[in-house]
Amino acid sequence: MLGLGAAGVAAAPLLQRGVDAVASRDPTGLTDVLPAGGAFRYYSVVASVPHKSPHDYRLRVDGLVERPATYSLADLRAEPQTRLVRDVQCVTGWRVPDTPFEGVRLSRLLDAAGVRPEAGAVRFTCFDGAYSESLTLEQARRDDVLVALRMQDKPLGHAHGGPVRLYVAPMYFYKSAKWLSGITVTADVQPGYWEQEGYDVDAWVGRSNSRDDAPTT
Ligand SMILES: Nc1nc2c(c(=O)[nH]1)N[C@H]1C(S)=C(S)[C@@H](COP(=O)(O)O)O[C@H]1N2
Ligand SMILES: [Mo]
């Protein structure tokens, strides 16, 4: 037993490296090797994501709207900002309490674009080139859904999806698409990246059964 313990200590740095490897192989965090300890974990479904400087960044709003628009980071900063402080909850069980997010209400950008009557949903795309998410129009118009520019009272860093990510406060964190580059108003909900793998499209924290349905690979 003693020998095993010593081996465990010796293996610890390796295990830590293993966690990073697991995070990149299994970006939902399903392989919960170590306790999170209230810390964020880094997730990306792709190995590397381009960096966008405050100058390069653009957000396109299009689809079933009267006035498609392209926002720079400066444009988004010039809009009224909303700050929310909630618990972040990943579907795999880790959570980070009382995390401030700040940005522009999505409903504001939708109103500016003029959503057409036949629209029923919103699709989000990312400049990682792979991830996507979606909300019904009703969900997208909630007051606690932000196009976030700040997290933990700092500008959003690249690891957390900066310069701009979606923040869907009432839902599991996989709804909060990082590296947001496109908001497309659509007729119907198109299931996002993880939703095509079996996660709930309506991912309300506490109400969704995503956790029980979580795929195991
Ligand atoms: N573009 C993109 N957005 C994403 C993900 C991703 O892999 N790519 N992972 C999601 C998941 S499963 C979680 S838990 C959170 C993690 O955010 P964080 O890396 O800032 O902790 O981002 C969500 N948004
Ligand atoms: Mo997640």
Image (cartoon, rainbow, N blue to C red):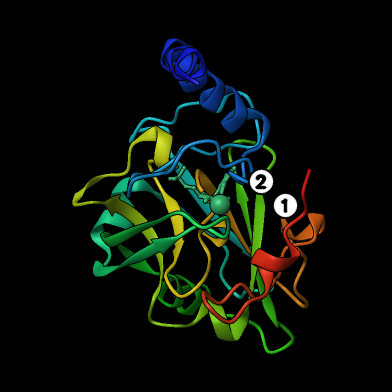
Q: Which residue is mark 1?
A: 193
Mark 2 lies on a secondary structure that is loop
Q: Quadrant of the C terminus?
A: top right
Image position of 15 with respect to 159: above or below? above
- Give the CA separation, mark 1 to mark 2: 6 Å
Q: Of marks 1 and 2, which one's residue comes earlier in the chain?
A: 2
Give, as a three-letter code, the residue at label 2.
Tyr
- Left or right of residue 116: residue 93: left
Question: As rendered, which of 74 and 49 lies closer to the eye?
Answer: 49
Question: Quarter of the image holding residue 126?
Answer: top right
Q: Which residue is mark 2?
A: 131
- Cβ of mark 1 under 8 Å from ligand 1: the answer is yes
Residue 70's x, y, as percent? Answer: 49, 53
Question: Quarter of the image holding residue 159?
Answer: top left
Mark 1 lies on a secondary structure that is loop
- Left or right of residue 206: residue 151: left
Residue beneath the point at 45% across and 54% down: 94
- Left or right of residue 20: residue 124: right
Residue 27's x, y, as percent? Answer: 62, 39
Q: Residues within 10 Å of mark 1 (few under 14, many from 20)?
A: some
- Left or right of residue 38: residue 62: right
Residue beneath the point at 51% across and 17% down: 4
Give, as a three-letter code, the residue at label 1.
Tyr
CB contact under 8 Å: marks 1 and 2: yes
Question: As rendered, which of 45 and 106 lies closer to the eye?
Answer: 45
Label ID, residue 128: none
Q: Residues within 10 Å of mark 2 (few under 14, many from 20)?
A: some
Question: As rendered, which of 130 and 54 lies closer to the eye?
Answer: 130
- Cβ of mark 2 under 8 Å from ligand 1: the answer is yes
Farthest left residue in view: 153
